[in-house]
Image: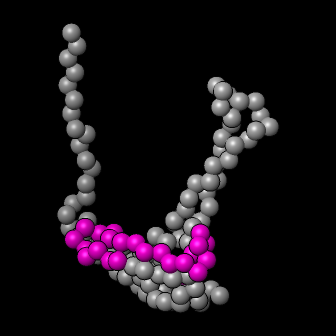
Amino acid sequence: MEVRELYKKAKKTMMPLELEELLKKKRKEDDKLVHGMFEFIDAHGGFMDFAYRKYPGEAIKMIKITHGDICDLPLGIVKHLNNTKRKVRKYDLTLPPVGGKPMRSFELQSRVKFTPLDVI
């Protein structure tokens, strides 16, 4: 017979006042508007439709952006869009198979890009 005792790991949290100040600072930074151009690399001429909410208690934003649109978006959403990546798997058939399967690797490719117009 085996007896195990499992405990939840204690969460390390900030003091409520510190957390509130930090969230206010980050929200203020993320709400700054950025004027730029959206590119949908996966589907030129297409559109991207997604829901976005970063902070608890915030309303859900439904966003639809078309390739080539020049618009103003909050900095938080711009950071989210520029971090959207996909994995492209590659099989190297020149190397001998391991366990009956060919060697695999992958690379990350960007799906979308939002370029601020002050950079262009």
Measured as percent of width and height from the top left, residue 26 is found at: 36, 73
**98 sits to left or right of 73:** right
Quadrant that contains the N terminus: top left
Q: Is residue 116 visible?
A: no
Q: Is residue 101 visible?
A: yes
Numbered-mark total: 0
What residue is rendered at 19% in x and 63% in y? 16
Q: Quadrant of residue 63?
A: bottom left
Measured as percent of width and height from the top left, residue 79 is found at: 48, 72
What residue is rendered at 58% in x and 54% in y? 87
Q: Report the front residue among 42 and 55.
A: 42
**28 sits to left or right of 98:** left
What residue is rendered at 56% in x and 81% in y? 67
Q: Residue furthest top?
A: 1
- Tell me which segment is drawn in magenta: 38-62
Q: Residue furthest right?
A: 94
